Amino acid sequence: MSSNSIGKYFTFNSWGESHGKAIGCVIDGVPSKIKLSETYIQNFLDKRKPGKNKYTTQRKESDKIEILSGVFQGLTTGHPISLIIYNEDHRSKDYLEIKNKFRPGHADYTYWKKYGIRDYRGGGRSSARETAVRVAAGAVARKVIDLKTKKKSNIIGALVQIGNIKINYENWDDKFILKNELFCPDKKVLNQWKELIVKARKEGSSLGAIIEIRASGIPAGLGEPVYEKFDSDIAKAMMTINAVKGVEIGNGFNSVYESGISNVDEMGVKNKKPFFYSNNNGGVLGGITTGQEIICRFVVKPTSSIITKRKTITTNLKKTTISTKGRHDPCVGIRAVPVGEAMMATTIADHCLRYL
């Protein structure tokens, strides 16, 4: 049976396919009397929606959100919130000539092998189109976090590497992230990234990327040791995003270059409260939040849908080649930024409802 939901106390169940009539989700666990509107949710969806610039897919979707249930007179009722987004610009004909071929790097073969049937139109259920409703769920989750923590939290994501070009963390600028199309925090690499993406698209190829998500204003004490660790839930949430192949918390894999002396987060007292001199562990120790900024990074592989011919086989197990036409992101990492923010928000909201 398919697993289409995530979370324990704050849960959402998504449904729909890339070229179906609509996509949507049902959110459960949201407390009553929280102010919520379609306009508020739409602000987050507009960050992710396709067709906004030449660096992402040219599929045009307004991603207009509709609230079907769970909200009355602008306030949540404490009952399931049902959301829907109608698909407007799907072009299924682009996939007719490859309907009997497996696209290398996609879930075509594995879905066919598992279910005996697959929706060849844009990948169906395996398409990143589904992530739009995750962003909507994440918007709702932010409201829950602020309610339970009794203060304004902040969750922000950014691209920190595209291809072989990395940012300089000393140039990190939160305000600049919101002012450019690539969610870039470093002004000095923005144009280099743009040139790299344009070049990859012209060559019929694509690029991978690393996204960093930061969450501040989150209290200490969320999560449990061993099997309900906060960071293990974050890792799971990020790994559910399309094309993600790795996740790290804090220093992550770079910890191998450190020693016990340099990597440990020393402690002191500041204003009569515990204080950490560094945050190499990304705001989590022993699976429990420390009250510091939570820092997570994940890597997305290069987009598998490319026009350059690749070797593959048909559903009849015949050797062939394939060129994937249609409108695809030359770097899925760009629109994965608001999705990563959403998955961070839903995970935090889930833990806030469990422990606060």
Image (cartoon, helix red, strand yellow):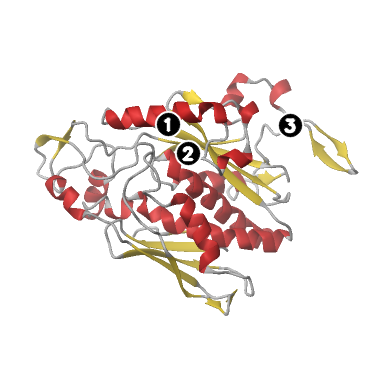
Q: Residues within 10 Å of mark 1 (few under 14, many from 20)?
A: some
Which residue is drawn at the image coordinates 44% and 40% (left, top)? 334
Kindly check if marks 2 and 1 are in contact, taking CB atoms under 8 A apart as contact: yes
Judge whether 240 appears above or below 1 on screen.
Answer: above
Q: Specify the quadrant of the image occupied by residue 106.
A: top left
Q: Which residue is mark 1?
A: 194
Figure check: 131 above or below 204: below
| C-alpha distance separating marks 2 and 1 | 8 Å
Name the residue beneath numbered marker 3: 278
Looking at this view, is 154 or 281 the one in front?
Answer: 154
- Mark found first going from the N terminus, 3 or 2: 2
Which of the pair 246/309 is nearer the observer? Answer: 309
Element class at badge 1? helix
* Among the two numbered marks 1 and 3 on one chain, the one whose residue lies closer to the N terminus: 1
Amino acid on which the number 2 mark rests in the picture = Leu
- Type of the residue with mark 3: Ser
Q: Position of residue 80 (x, y in %)?
A: 51, 73
Which residue shows up at 44% across the image and 48% down it? 240
Which of pointers 2 and 1 lies earlier in the amino acid sequence?
2
* Residue 303 picture quarter: top left
Q: Measure the C-alpha gap from mark 3 to mark 2.
A: 29 Å
Rendered view: 133 above or below 303:
below
Q: Secondary structure beneath disc 3? A: loop
- Which quadrant of the rendered structure holds the N terminus? bottom left
> Which mark is nearer the camera, 1 or 3?
1
Query: Furthest residue to the bottom?
Result: 73
Q: Position of residue 109 (x, y in %)?
A: 23, 44
Residue at x-position 12% and y-position 46%: 97
Residue bearing mark 2? 182
Residue 37 picture location, percent across and down: 55, 69
Q: Are marks 1 and 3 in contact (CB under 8 Å)?
A: no
